[in-house]
Amino acid sequence: MRINMTSILAVLAASARGRVAAFSTTRSKIPAAARSLVTRNMATGPMPYDDDKMPIYALGMNIGLQISQQVRAVRRVASRAQSTTDFKTLLEEDELEILLKGFGDIVTGENSANPMEVLQKYGPAVNQLLRERMDGILDRVKKDGEEFIAGFLDCNEEAVKTDSGLVYYSMKEGDGASPTKADEVEVHYHGTLTDGTVFDSSVDRGATIKFKLGQVIQGWQEGLAMMKEGGKATLVIPSDLAYGDAGSGGAVPPGATLKFEVELFKVNP
């Protein structure tokens, strides 16, 4: 990964000459990714410096936000969907200190090595390091999913695990038709991650949804085919039957196991 310090410093220089603003206080102009990062790092304590020094501190935070967004961009290019991955999850504490030393040396001009030579020599190693760390995070997410499924089966003796890995638990038996992939279904659903985070819910929106069963994720296709009209069930869907290693936008992390409570109201052939 190459951090484009040239573009960042160019923005700062232009700001000093009055051509552009380093950052805006208007919320609507702040990129969504930056707003998310700011929210996650928001503290309730006092400002770390007096008001006369805080603009410099704020400038440093702005540069940090830009760099963190570049990390997310690299992750998306590598076919990893947006998630909460940041420097703290990718690097150990001592590695963060080294990263900040490299950043500080560039900003202060105290670097002893030629930056372009360093990037040319170690750039491939940086990319390899990031790939390995990201793959490690993905493996941990999948392992958490496996443990969640095992725990769910232990706590719900009537739940069944199919050959594909789907877990099906009937909460209420229906007495109508079972859908096929070609049918349209009308359902209510409540989707959560294994930690209980709600990522999508027609129940919360207060409106049922209709769709062709063959157009949704494989876990839904298999799970709803096991239901009948009027029934309600819990589906625990491993990542390979859901959104896989790509995840889905910012809502479903890569490799995530999903839990749905689904109520099937109507099957329309």
Image: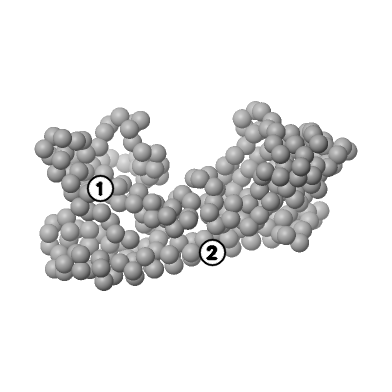
Image mark for residue 164: none
Looking at the rendered structure, the secondary structure element under dot 2 is: helix
Q: Residues within 10 Å of mark 1 (few under 14, many from 20)?
A: some
* Alpha carbon distance from label 2 to label 1: 31 Å
- What residue is shown at x 22% (from left), y 48% (from top)? 8
Q: Pinpoint residue 140: horizontal percent, then vertical percent.
A: 53, 62
Label 2 sits on residue: 139
**SS assignment at label 1:** helix
* Residue nearest the viewer, comparing 47 with 169: 169
Quadrant, the N terminus: bottom left
Instruction: Choose the circle earlier in sequence order: 2 or 1.
Output: 1
Q: Is residue 225 left or right of residue 45?
A: right
**Height in image: 192 above or below 184?**
below
Q: Identify whether 96 is placed above or below 243.
A: below
Q: Nearer the viewer, residue 157 or 183?
A: 183
* Residue 71 seen anywhere in this rendered image of the structure: yes
Residue furthest to the right in view is: 175
In which quarter of the view is residue 39 placed? top left
In this view of the protein, can residue 174 be seen by the observer? no
Read off the residue under disc 1. Answer: 63
Residue at (74% x, 34% y) in the render: 186
Identity of the residue drawn at 28% across and 70% down? 122
